[in-house]
Amino acid sequence: MFEEIDYRVVEKILLGESNFNEQQKSFIELFESKTIVAGPGAGKTTALAAKIILLLQHLKRTGSSDGLCIITYTNVAVKEINDTLLKAGIGLLTHPHFIGTIHEFFNKFCVIPHFKKEYKHNSLFFSDDDLLSKEFYIKFLTRNHHWMQDKTKTAIAQRICGSKLIYNETTKNLELENTTAWEDRLFTNHKAKMLNAKILRRKNGYLEYDDTFLFSQFFLSDTRFLEIIRKRFKYCFIDEFQDTSVSGLALLRKLFDVENNIMQMIGDPFQTIIYDQPMPRVDEGTVFRLNISNRFGKEISDHLNIIMPEANIQAVENKKSFKPIILLYKEDKDIYTSYRSIISEHEEEHDFYKNCEKEDKVLVWSRGWTSLLKEGKAYSNKKRKSFETKNHQIKHLIIEFICEKIKSTDENHSILKKWIHDHPAMIELNGILVEIIKNGVINPHKENLKILINRLLGEKGGGVIIASNHIFKNIKDILTNTNTFDPKIIDYESSDDIFTIHSVKGETLRSVLVVNFNGGPLTKIMFHKYEIKDDADYIYTDHNLLYVAMSRVTHLFVYALHIDNWNDDVRNKLQDNWTIKDIT
């Protein structure tokens, strides 16, 4: 399907002097509905970018009008793919294609059209702030049931907030579900007024984030609209499917998992680490595996396959890592300094490790354990600083400017920022900013930005701006500022290298120390997977956390184990494949 010359160009852009391996090429050339289970370090993001570039070139060459729908988990991923397309000379994705988060997709193609059709407006405000909703429902009850006591109105308003709106596919109506464990008799008595209040707030354009899928379900119940979207997007690629909303994923399946469309879900179900989020069920008959990792050597992959045999991670032959270390300790306070000593020793003895520019991090199951590792230090939510791109600086400037212009309304600042971040116009803003960064604050890009800002201001009654507004000078100042810094020379707070496992998902690190104090499940999981204990009483989320922690590293994995857990049986199971470092 793809020409060899196109392949070579894409490899040059994305890999430099390297080439895609045969497994990656097979994925790039795969065009049937499949679930792509992509292991850590398998080059999933790069291979997907190559697939998109080559497919777009093919569609252009053949004159096809088929559209690509690319669903990403974050806007950061949107930027990464768009930046790659710019490098390849393709430019930003435009009609008939789409790239964005699942909420952006369904809001654009289902929710906004639904509100235009049913309620003759598309001014939508998304928030999960129960306080705002509760105030609305109290006013609704006061207006329609003025005889109620204030205490009763407040109690019912609280129940309205907690009751869930659902779509009944049989009746094709919105209904209310008793999700507050209210006594059935009381719920039945008040259900009609509660439902009316809930629907009225939605009709006015005040939605919760899950309402995206609710109203999309409503909209897609009309098969005409279902077919229009299907015909526009022949190809649908869902990145990080394991993190995608269950409701959203079901709707995407309804849309694209059909005979004439190609739907590919790409991700790693074993990296599902959000508590209460169900582990995706994967049909092995529809699976294509990307399991050859370029991140670490066999020294790590062998242990990953003990922790998570289903992942079946394979390492490339020329990749070298260290045998992982069990750090035996007695005193909590000795763990951190011993880990730093291990890092220093490896740097002195191995240049390839010393020259690796990835970070070293201490990973904890519970953030409260930071003070046990470093006395008097609390867990810091502050991430390590990294260079903020001009794109991010300008976007932040614009968002703050818009908030400032409409702050005279009663809207909360943080809610306003969230409204702007989630607005469908953010996709358009990204495209305008790319052009401004490339070409400067000149027309037509300046004019397009002014129109977009005025559109957002207009939706909240914030007035309009003209082309001489100071915002454009401030953008120019950012573009002409040549100050940069090297993140490696910043003096961080000492506790800033301690992170929860959740916070480093998606990162690649030089080394990791995992700490599991009493109350944490990780040692129990380790002992079960290495056949030291029969006890398998743990949840899959914690199992996945251990897998995620170990799979971050390029070179060195260290696990801190209290001496009380060490005995002959443990020694016999671990000593051949782990380096044992006893600091007791």
Image (tube, rainbow, N blue to C red):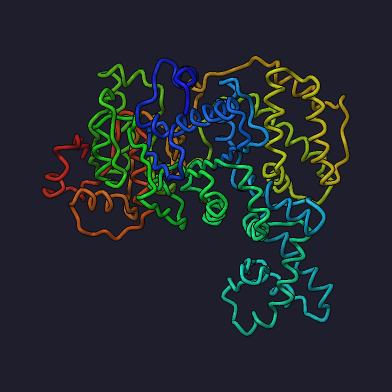
**Place of residue 485 in the rendered image (x, y in percent of width and height, measured from the top left):** 56, 18
Q: Quick check: 272 left or right of 82?
A: left
**Can residue 299 be seen by looking at this rendering?**
yes
- Residue at the location (38% across, 47% down)? 270
**Between 427 and 148, the one nearer to me in the picture:** 427
- Residue at the location (61% across, 25% down)? 389
- Residue at the location (79% across, 39% down)? 404
Q: Is residue 280 shown above or below 263? A: below
- Residue at the location (64% across, 79% down)? 187
Considering every residue shown, the one lying at the far front of the view is 62
**Place of residue 271 in the rendered image (x, y in percent of width and height, measured from the top left):** 40, 45
Q: Is residue 238 shown above or below 125? A: above
**Between 94 and 107, the one nearer to me in the picture:** 94
Q: Is residue 426 shown above or below 393? A: below
Q: Quick check: 495 left or right of 485?
A: left
Count of marks placed on residues: 0
Q: Is residue 201 shown above or below 116? A: below
**Place of residue 506 in the rendered image (x, y in percent of width and height, measured from the top left):** 45, 37
| Quarter residue 188 falls in | bottom right
**Place of residue 215 in the rendered image (x, y in percent of width and height, measured from the top left):** 67, 58
Of the 4 image quadrants, the one containing the C terminus is top left
| Quarter residue 236 falls in | top right
| Quarter residue 549 falls in | top left
**Can residue 345 be seen by looking at this rendering?**
no
Q: Quick check: 384 left or right of 24?
A: right
